[in-house]
Amino acid sequence: MAGAHRGVKHRREGHAGSVDTAQEVLEAARLRAAALTSGDPQELRRLLHPQFRWFTHTGERFDRDTFVTSNTEGPTRWDRQELTEVNVVAHERTAVLHCQVVDAVDHGAGVEELHMPMTQVWVRDDDHWVCLAGHAGPVPVPTAS
């Protein structure tokens, strides 16, 4: 997953010295993407808040349980998720990540690549970041030339 983060950087003191909150959130988003591509339900659940909500580019709505099940037990298989043009606006315990995403997903008919904007809201839960909510889309409609 490529992309640098921009935006408000909030630094906090931790066991390893000064830590960049925006970088922590970006790393959590990368771990979430890795859990999707590996199909790891435990890791994905660990990275999602118990009250997690997700809205897809097609209008589907998920809570944490239905999101994890849909992305790890059903016919959907993730090939990869790439985040680019990442911008993180962060505060000590809350952050918003906005980016362009490439979702390479197989719903049973071969891998399809979707390019679209994505927004995620992250909150600090004790010592790690969890995704509280997010949405992807809309997928840009090709224009006739």
Image (tube, grey):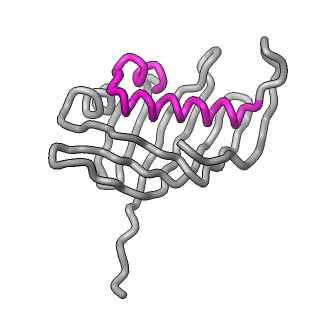
* Chain part drawn in magenta: 20-48
The residue drawn where x is 23% and y is 38% is 76
Magenta segment's dominant SS is helix
User: Which of the two residues, 127 or 28, is positioned nearer the viewer here?
Assistant: 28
Residue 73 located within the stretch drawn in magenta:
no
Image quadrant containing the C terminus: bottom left
The residue drawn where x is 66% and y is 30% is 24
User: Which of the two residues, 14 or 53, is positioned nearer the viewer here?
Assistant: 14
Image: 4 above or below 20? below
Residue 113's x, y, as percent? Answer: 34, 54
Q: Residue furthest top?
A: 15
The residue drawn where x is 36% and y is 71% is 141
Residue 14's x, y, as percent? Answer: 79, 16
User: Which of the two residues, 39 or 79, is positioned nearer the viewer here?
Assistant: 79
Judge from the rendering whether residue 3 lies leftward or rightward of residue 7; answer left or right: left
Total numbered badges shown on the rendered structure: 0
Judge from the rendering whether residue 101 lies leftward or rightward of residue 67; answer left or right: right
Image: 62 above or below 101? above
Q: Quadrant of residue 95?
A: top right
Q: Residue furthest bottom?
A: 145
Judge from the rendering whether residue 31 lies leftward or rightward of residue 20; answer left or right: left
Residue 140's x, y, as percent? Answer: 40, 67
Q: Quadrant of residue 88?
A: top right
